[in-house]
Every structure is written in C-alpha cells, then in structure tokens.
Image: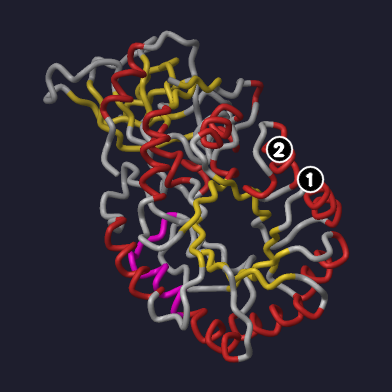
Amino acid sequence: MSSNMKIIDEARTLTYPTPFFYTSKKILKKNYEAFTDLFAEKSEIYYAVKANADRRILTYLNELGCRFEAASWFEIDELVSLGVKPESIIYGTSVKPLEHIKRAAADGVNRFAADSKEEIEKIAVCAPGAKVFIRTIVDDTGSVFTMSERFGAPVSTVKNIILYARDLGLKTYGISFYVGSQAASAKQWAKGIETVRPVIEELYEEGVVLEVINIGGGFPVVYGNHENVPEMAEIVARTHNALHTLPYLPKIIMEPGRGIVATSTVMVAEVISKTVRGGSVWLCVDGGIYNALYEAMINQGATRYRAYPPKRIPDPTKMMSCTLAGPTGDSLDIIARDVDLPSYVTVGDRLVFENAGAYTVTMACNFNGFPKPELYLG
C-alpha cells in the first residue's frame, strides 16, 4: 500500500503531547472492507488481536462486523468485555495453557487451534466437544518473520491428528497454516494450499469433510525499505486458483492483523536532541523502539518506518542524512539510519512515522520510565 498523505497531514495539525499514535477510522474501515472483498467464495475475516489490541480499535472493528483471532484467554476476556460475541472469536494459537482453554470454553469460545496430539488431548479435557483446526507447517521462506520452527505440525501427521481429535469427541473443523509475517512472494498462500491438498483429499475419501481452510495472515505492508512487496491482486489470483484444485471448497478464513491495522495509524514524536556524531547528524526523538516502534529493532532494520517532517518540504534540495534514535539510555534504541529529512528539522519539531499501527501499541513498554504513547482515533 502506498503512503497515505492525508493521515500524515492530519497528524501534523494535532497538538496532543508527544509521543502519540493517531489512528484513522476511515483507513481501518477501508482496509477491513478490502479483505472482505478478496474472494468471491464465502470467506470470513478474523482480525489478529496481537497486532494492535487497543480497546477503541477492537470496538470499532467489532462495530464493522469483524471477527477476531485471539492468542490467549487474556485477549478473549478483553474481547468479551467489549461485547464481542464468543462465536466471533477463534483461539488461534496452537500452544495454550490448560487454564486458558478452560476459561475460553467457559466464555463460550468453541474453536481452537492445535498442532499436536498432546494439544488435542488438552482441548478434549478442557473443552469437550469443541471444534478444532490443525495448524500445519508450510513454506515460509522469504517472510520477514517466520513461524515454522515453533508452530505447526508436519503435514505428514495432520491427517492422524485430525482423526485422533475425532476419536476424542472433538469436531474436525479444519486445517490452518501461516506463511509468516510480511511474506515476500505472492505464491506463498497458494503453495500452502498445495501442501495441505493431499490431506484434504485423503480425508474426503474417508468421508471426513472439513468446514474451513484457514490461510492465516502474513499479507504484506509497504514500509520504507519494502517497496517491492507482492500485490494483493496477484496473491488472491494465485490463492483462488489453488483453492479450486481441492475436491470441494471449504469456507475460507483469513487472519490479517498487520494488513488491517498497520496503515491506519501513524506515530508522532518530538525531536529532543540534534547533534553530530562521527560526522553524521543524529536526531533523538521521544518515541523510540522500546516505547513505540519495537519492530524497528527486533529485525535490525527490516521494519523501516518512513519519517515525515513537520511541514511540506519547501526546498527538497536542502536535505540532510541522519540517524534517528529514541529517548532511552540504551545503545540499541536506534530507529533507523541514513534517513533523509529537511535540514531545517531541529529540537522541538515533530516527526510523523508512517504505517505505525501494527506491533507497536501492543509491544510498547516503559523502559527507562519513558511512557508508552497514547492512541487517539479520528
């Protein structure tokens, strides 16, 4: 997705104390509705709460009719407290504490992910009769964040796990996979379907029809150094073709988190220091990797947020290359290097960081005592 200059310009006019996040409800709605229109076949969207669990964002998405994928009972409890119906929630992580399964079931949630016989046994005891979907390993090569080492059953074991779940009185709801976050190839979802197709075919021959195929999330967003991400139209076309090779068409579930929330939100921070170190300009701002932009650190620059100056650039030739750093006393608190900004930017000016809605609010902490930014909706 391209830069949304309207939200940048709106953020420039706001006078809230920095640092703060600003979320556009219009962009949230636009992004959610875009996912609902991806497939002609019946599909359901379950927003991945972990991407941004701000109560106002969850409330608004619920008002739009969005469903939710939760990764803990804590998230489920929050959703229920906001009026989300249990039938609109799936417990999507495949490793869960026993007590969380019990509490989720007590709240009325009856769809659980699993990726092992041991997890199936836990669900059978704590949520008897529940629906289960089995998460399998698929190719996540090239994704910025991969999951296959920790989560997912080898595809060769999925059929037996599904039949084992049935034998324990659970309902064989479906199969899920996850191609990783920020997938780099439009083929990945289609390849995932090709991976699970033999399992679906074998089960079908034995009279087991799955209700859903959950193709997860991973739908990429354009950040400052990811211009060539796959186009959604190509992802959908390839996935659509792969779906129609199955012996029947289950309901399609998607779990976008970043794809819905990332571009809806910007972060505004104030420059608190401007100096030269080693011949390079350093700008320190009051919103750094610990209290605002964690992904800028964890993959060492893989998530690079575009920074915009406090006003439209009057003369694009008067630029400086600088390093952006946060406010803490930690040497790791570096947001980005080699950032081009107008040379007029100085202490007291505000910078707007684009596409800051995903894995920012939920991962922020108060390291060194610096407060987490407030979030405002507009």
Q: Do the residues labelled 2 and 1 touch (CB within 8 Å)?
A: yes
Residue 107 got which mark?
1
Image position, residue 40 (x, y; %): 36, 60
Residue 192 sits inside the magenta stretch: yes
Distance from the alpha carbon under mark 2 to that under mark 1: 8 Å
Q: In which quarter of the image is residue 129?
A: bottom right
First to last magenta residue range: 182-194
- In this rendering, is residue 65 above or below 21? below
> 118 and 210: which one is in front?
210
Image position, residue 86 (x, y; %): 69, 46
> 239 and 181: which one is in front?
239
Quarter of the image where the N terminus is located? top left
Residue 183 sits inside the magenta stretch: yes
Q: Which kind of residue does numbered mark 1 sit on?
A: Asp
Residue 365 got which mark?
none
> 261 and 168: which one is in front?
168
User: In the shown orientation, is residue 73 left or right of residue 322?
Assistant: right
Q: Which residue is drawn at 78% across and 49% down?
A: 104
Image position, residue 305 (x, y; %): 37, 37
- In this rendering, is residue 308 above or below 173? above
**Total tally of numbered discs in the picture:** 2
Q: Residue at x 30, y 16 (%)?
A: 310
- In this rendering, is residue 149 above or below 49? below
Label 2 environment density (alpha carbons within 10 Å; few <14, some 14–19, many ≥20): some
User: In the shown orientation, is residue 51 left or right of residue 240?
Assistant: right
Image position, residue 370 (x, y; %): 61, 21
Q: Upstream in the sequence, badge 2 or badge 1?
A: 2
Residue 80 got which mark?
2
> 234 and 143: which one is in front?
234
Q: Quadrant of residue 74?
A: top right
Q: Which residue is drawn at 39% across and 81% down?
A: 245
Quarter of the image where the C terminus is located? top left
